[in-house]
Amino acid sequence: MLNWRDPHNPLAGGAERVTHAYMRGLVDRGHEVTWFANAFEGCDPEEIIDGIRVLRSGGKFTSWMDARKWHSCEKPFDLVIDQHHGIPWYAPVWCSDRCVAYIHEVLGPIWDAFYSWPLNMIGKWQERLTIRQYQEVRFWTASSFTRSLLEEQGVQAVTQIPYGVDTRALKDLPEKELDEPLKLITVSRLAPNKQVDHAIYALKILQEEHDLEGCLKIVGKGQEKGALSQLVKELGLQDSVTFVGALSESEKEEALQQAHFLLHTSVREGWGLNVVEANAMGTPAIVYPSPGLVESTTHRETGLVTDDSSPSDLAATIAGVQSHDGAYQDWRKTARDRAHGFHWDKVLPDALDQLERWASEER
């Protein structure tokens, strides 16, 4: 597995969580698994995590060269997985082993969230060029939207494998009425593309224009924490917004269970793991009409998809559910039931079977 981040990287997110599950599953089946990742401050160059040999060397733009040098001294692998996050590892160029490309989303507009002109345009250009160069490489993704984008750009073989979650769906849903204050929650890295500031603005609009009391709990850490904290102060929402940082899985599940709605305002997602995690706790999601999120949320069945990607529309959508308490209870149950089918117990066996088939194919 070639991936920028490993599970212990401070910047690890949903991509690393699902990658970890797949690789751990292969180890449990008796396979030898190596995960080559970028180095980070204070890291060990080599570590064993759940039986996975994790190697760390180089940075965002140099790791692939270190991986190439290391690989040249190794015996052939049955399968090399080149995971794309805007920039690939170019494994098919320097590796004669069987290679598959693993991608969560084509970044596209996400480049604009992180970089200004001209770097954002350079990023988009190289991503399109890379996909064209990988046209004959087999791709693997969880998103039907990503699959369509890849096929439109000429990729010849794309296999869709669903994500799984560790969160077990509740057997019994505790009572939860839509009483004020509405309890809202976001769970994500605090990064520009996640647009957590939209959830904060929406809360302000909800209070001022819709005369509804609400509170927002922000779970996660990242580079935008300072700017988001300043925004909360500027809007006078110190008593309504709480930053809780990263939580343990049990703490996160408890926070999700207590919330009325998960809010997800990302520019683009591979799928939206935290949506299904919230659903497993009987909490519907209200999401932007973004690629990935419209797959993890079934509109008016497991939650709501806003018409527009704006704080005002998000606030209006939240306010609109107040008069549909019966529907809300139906959404809770349907969301919980659907999430049950995405637990790793259901997803992982078929996914591992596919990886083993690729590893055994003739070169």
Image (cartoon, grey):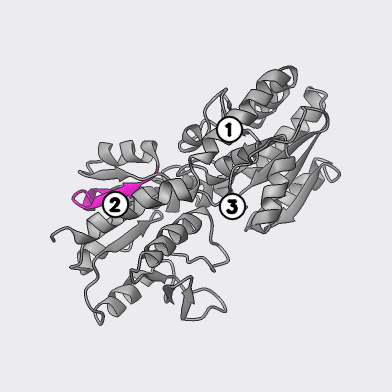
Is residue 257 positioned above or below 332 on the image?
Answer: below
Identity, as a three-letter code, of the amino acid under mark 3 = Ala
Identity of the residue furthest to the top in this view: 323
Per the rendered image, the range of residues in magenta is 131-142
Q: Name the residue under label 3.
A: 191
| Residue 222 on image: x %, y % | 63, 58
Q: In this view, does 21 lie to the left or right of 227?
A: left
Q: What element carries label 1?
A: helix
Q: Mark 2 points at which residue?
A: 354
Q: Which residue is drawn at 54% across and 39% down?
A: 339
Q: Tag on residue 335?
A: 1
Identity, as a three-letter code, of the amino acid under mark 2 = Gln
Choose top left, top right, bottom left or bottom right for residue 66. bottom left
Q: Is residue 14 left or right of residue 255?
A: left
| Residue 277 on image: x %, y % | 59, 44
The residues bearing labels 3 and 1 have C-alpha atoms spaced at a distance of 27 Å
Nearer to us in this view, 240 or 133: 240
Q: How crowded is mark 3: few (under 14 residues within 10 Å), some or many (20 or more)?
A: some
Choose top left, top right, bottom left or bottom right for residue 89. bottom left
The residues bearing labels 2 and 1 have C-alpha atoms spaced at a distance of 28 Å
Q: Residue at x 48, y 43 (%)?
A: 342
Q: How crowded is mark 1: few (under 14 residues within 10 Å), some or many (20 or more)?
A: many
Q: Residue at x 71, y 57 (%)?
A: 245
